[in-house]
């Protein structure tokens, strides 16, 4: 099957468009994304390399059980790249003229491209139809042999100088140190992604795969933190409304806001993992709420109204 099609601008090596035909479940999303990123870097190097002979109709590069097929489309100044199973090479060779004919219809779009990849979204549906009508679509995974694919990609990539390698290692080691000393989950995830990219350049399979798993774990933690933020956000308002309802005609200071405090405190604790500064506001409010006797009636009422008006959209708190 075809896993991915890339379209690169021939004279710059910039990726203009990519279409994935790979089905990935949630647990493999990060892994697939990183492998495709490695593949993009690898192919981009080939495209901008002067040794690529565009006078030949096709350039084939074998990667384990897979193949990368590159064909140039001079009319629109594009290099079209397929990542597919070796066994589908003949089918792809028959498909290529049809895709070239289709893409040439968008000559002006390609030649006047200003850097906005979204412009090529109009290719998605017709390109997919052409591919699916000409190449079998068996559900397989590009991640079946991740270590073999990595080694195959790296074996075909140019060697880095000693100086570049040392700089990349230094940059990566600094990121790993920061990851270990940072609590903000999105920041840790972003740095883990950079470690993966650097490890790919260094051809370091152990660190590459280790931080693939680390990124997966961090993204799971972020998702879990958001879920709990939403839970505590709802409970804050429910517990406040219950406390107000139980007041009756009694003064506001006689209200039992303990549950509201606990939920607000828990909310700020989870928010601390996502937003470096925003959590402090709600921790301070929680402290004022539990120490309500130090507030006058107007101030306490003002705090309660502020909490009841909190946005129900968790994304508004993430900074």
Image (tube, rainbow, N blue to C red):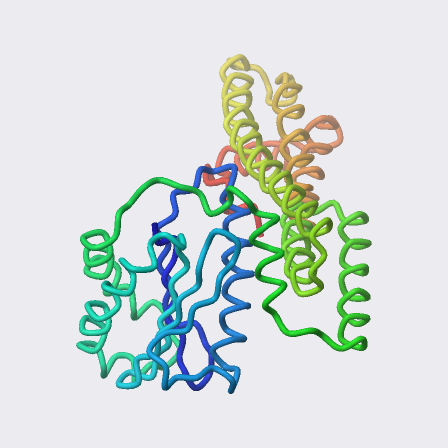
On the image, the x and y values in percent for residue 172 come to 76, 61
On the image, the x and y values in percent for residue 16 come to 38, 72
Residue 112 appears in the rendering: no
Q: Observer-nearest residue: 171 or 136?
A: 136
Q: How many marks?
A: 0
Quarter occupied by residue 94:
bottom left
Q: What residue do we see at 79% from left, 64% from top? A: 169
In the image, is residue 245 above or below residue 117? above
Quarter occupied by residue 294:
top right
Q: What residue do we see at 63% from left, 46% from top? A: 212
Quarter occupied by residue 150:
bottom right
Q: Relative to 192, is 136 on the left or the right?
A: left
Q: What residue do we see at 46% from left, 83% from top? A: 12
In the image, is residue 80 above or below residue 245? below
Q: Relative to 117, is 150 on the left or the right?
A: right
On the image, the x and y values in percent for residue 82 come to 38, 63
Q: Relative to 194, is 64 on the left or the right?
A: left
Q: What residue do we see at 41% from left, 73% from top? A: 59
Q: Observer-nearest residue: 144 or 6?
A: 144
In the image, is residue 79 above or below residue 22? below
Residue 77 appears in the rendering: yes
On the image, the x and y values in percent for residue 241 come to 50, 21
Q: Observer-nearest residue: 29 or 115?
A: 29
Q: Relative to 315, is 210 on the left or the right?
A: right
């Amino acid at each position: 099957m075809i896993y991915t099609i890339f379209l690169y601008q021939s004279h710059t090596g910039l990726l203009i468009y990519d279409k994935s035909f790979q089905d990935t479940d949630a647990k493999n999303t990060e892994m697939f994304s990183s492998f495709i990123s490695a593949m993009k870097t690898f192919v981009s190097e080939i495209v901008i390399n002067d040794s690529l002979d565009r006078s030949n109709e096709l350039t084939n590069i074998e990667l384990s059980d897979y193949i990368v097929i590159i064909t140039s489309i001079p009319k629109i100044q594009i290099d079209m790249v397929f990542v597919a199973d070796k066994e589908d090479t003949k089918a792809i060779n028959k498909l290529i003229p049809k895709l070239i004919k289709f893409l040439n219809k968008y000559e002006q779009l390609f030649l006047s491209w200003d850097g906005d990849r979204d412009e090529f979204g109009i290719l998605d549906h017709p390109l997919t139809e052409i591919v699916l009508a000409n190449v079998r679509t068996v559900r397989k995974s590009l991640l079946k042999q991740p270590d073999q694919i990595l080694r195959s990609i790296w074996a075909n990539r140019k060697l880095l100088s000693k100086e570049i390698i040392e700089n990349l290692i230094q940059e990566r080691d600094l990121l790993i140190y920061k990851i270990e000393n940072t609590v903000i989950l999105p920041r840790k995830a972003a740095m883990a992604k950079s470690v993966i990219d650097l490890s790919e350049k260094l051809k370091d399979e152990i660190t590459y795969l280790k931080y693939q798993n680390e990124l997966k774990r961090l993204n799971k933690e972020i998702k879990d933190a958001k879920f709990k933020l939403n839970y505590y956000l709802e409970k804050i308002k429910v517990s406040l409304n219950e406390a107000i309802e139980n007041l009756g005609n009694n003064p506001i200071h006689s209200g039992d806001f303990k549950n509201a405090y606990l939920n607000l405190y828990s909310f700020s604790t989870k928010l601390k993992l996502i937003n470096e500064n925003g959590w402090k506001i709600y921790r301070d409010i929680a402290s004022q709420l539990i120490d309500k006797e130090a507030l006058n009636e107007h101030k306490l009422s003002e705090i309660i109204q502020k909490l009841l008006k909190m946005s129900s959209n968790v994304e508004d708190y993430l900074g």
